[in-house]
Image (cartoon, rainbow, N blue to C red):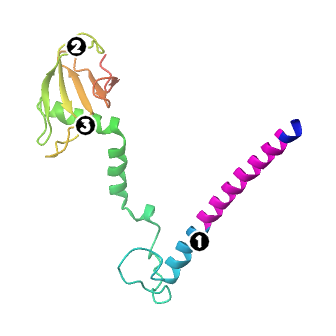
Amino acid sequence: MLGFVLCCLASYYERETMDRTWKIYGILVVLGGLLVGGITGSPNAGSSSEPTVSSVSVPSVLPAGPPLHDATPPLDRQLHRAAKDPLQKAKNLLEAIQKHEGKALSGYIGGRVFQNRERRLPLGRYREYDVNPKVHGRSRNAERIVIEQDTGRAYYTGDHYRTFMPLNEIP
């Protein structure tokens, strides 16, 4: 009896292994056919009705000049770097808001009362400002600056008031 069970299990295992092997083989054959057909420009390679061009007639194009990461002028690289650092962007905006006596900059939404309902910030009177300019047809996103009106202490939030990071040190 035990021999019969072992024989059946071996047969089942062998059948499952063979099925899996044939499936993998079939996938490889199809991929290989697509790869070879795509390179040679075979009309049977895909379902596209566009004419194919032989790879022999396509000239090779090599990039001219330095690699792309060095192609950006130094000033642009500094601006891109500042734009990637949200805290630096928020600090620059805070400075500009302070120069405008607490008024929102042109193109930005801000100056509204922030009520601090969740009490994640110390008690005080706060105003909120968007870190990024408003683009018509797009959401405002989650980045904000919140400024306490009496002390001038400012906080940055990148997750719409869930967490705050201090932007300035006021003694």
Which numbered circle lies on residue 141? Answer: 3
Residue placed under numbered mark 1 in the picture: 32
Question: Circle 3: is it few (<14), some (14-19), or many (20+) Cα within 10 Å?
Answer: few
Would you identify the image quadrant in which residue 95 lies? top left
Q: Is residue 7 left or right of residue 130?
A: right
Q: Is residue 152 magenta?
A: no
Residue at 59% across, 63% down = 27
Q: Main secondary structure of the magenta part?
A: helix
C-alpha separation, residue under disc 2 versus residue under disc 3: 20 Å
| Dot placed on the residue nearer the N-terminal end, 2 or 3 | 2
Residue 137 on image: x %, y %: 15, 46
Q: In the rendered image, which quarter contains the C terminus?
A: top left
Are the residues flagged by discs 1 and 2 in contact, CB closer than 8 Å? no
Question: Circle 1: is it few (<14), some (14-19), or many (20+) Cα within 10 Å?
Answer: few
| Helix, strand or loop under label 1 | helix
Residue 151 on image: x %, y %: 22, 16
Residue kind at label 1, given as amino acid type: Gly
Q: Which residues are magenta?
A: 5-28
Residue placed under numbered mark 2 in the picture: 117
C-alpha separation, residue under disc 1 versus residue under disc 3: 45 Å
Q: Nearer the viewer, residue 145 or 91?
A: 145
Residue kind at label 2, given as amino acid type: Arg
Residue kind at label 3, given as amino acid type: Asn
Residue at 23% across, 40% down = 132
